[in-house]
Image (tube, rainbow, N blue to C red):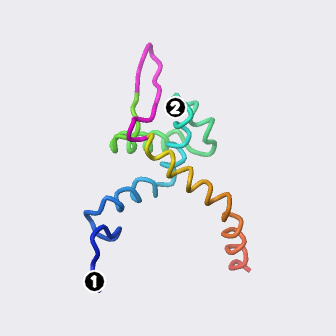
Amino acid sequence: MRVYSGSVFLADCPARLAIEIIADKWAAVVLFALSREPCRHGELVDLIGVISRKVLTQTLRRLRGYGLVDRYAEGGKVEYVLTDLGRTLVEPIAVLTEWAHVHGRAVVEFQESQAE
């Protein structure tokens, strides 16, 4: 088997890192939520819905560790905002969202057909 430069299966490939970041269950959702405006922790919980506060905190910490989200505390208020780097993921997430709108029903129908 020939190994190609840039293969997502190689440990040092940047594409693998990108997949690792957005493959987290909540990362893309949190990034998309923050793409509209800075949000407080509770606002994100309300906006996203079914995410627990603990999982949101873990997700925000992970995204901060990648340099995609900043945390600002001012006057006792803490807000989260996308960094310039984080904003570069808004368009790819929008493309995935569009794919889900176009093909999501087909995936659900396939899953339902397999369950029968």
Q: Quadrant of residue 32?
A: top right
Looking at the rendered structure, the secondary structure element under dot 1 is loop
Residue at 60 percent across and 41 percent down: it is 48
Residue at 62 percent across and 55 percent down: it is 98
**Is the stretch drawn in magenta largely helix, strand or loop?**
strand
Mark 2 = which residue? Answer: 41
- Place of residue 4 in the rendered image (x, y in percent of width and height, measured from the top left): 29, 75
Residue type at mark 2 is: His
- Place of residue 72 in the rendered image (x, y in percent of width and height, measured from the top left): 40, 24
The local crowd at label 2, few if under 14, some if 14 to 19, many if 20 or more residues have their Cα within 10 Å, is some
Residue at 48 percent across and 41 percent down: it is 54
Q: CA distance from mark 2 to mark 1?
A: 47 Å
The local crowd at label 1, few if under 14, some if 14 to 19, many if 20 or more residues have their Cα within 10 Å, is few
- Place of residue 102 in the rendered image (x, y in percent of width and height, measured from the top left): 68, 61
Range of magenta residues: 72-86
Left or right position of 84 against 103: left
Looking at this view, name the residue that lies furthest to the top. Answer: 75
Mark 1 = which residue? Answer: 2
Residue type at mark 1 is: Arg
Left or right position of 112 against 45: right
Query: Is 84 in the magenta?
Result: yes
Q: Is residue 5 above or below residue 79?
A: below
Identify which residue, 5 or 97, lies in the foreground. 5
Q: Quadrant of residue 99?
A: bottom right
Number of numbered discs: 2
Residue at 57 percent across and 45 percent down: it is 51
Along the polypeptide, which appears first: circle 2 or circle 1?
Answer: 1
Left or right position of 77 against 17: right
Q: Is residue 39 above or below residue 98?
A: above
Quadrant, the N terminus: bottom left
Which of discs 2 and 1 lies nearer the camera? The answer is 1
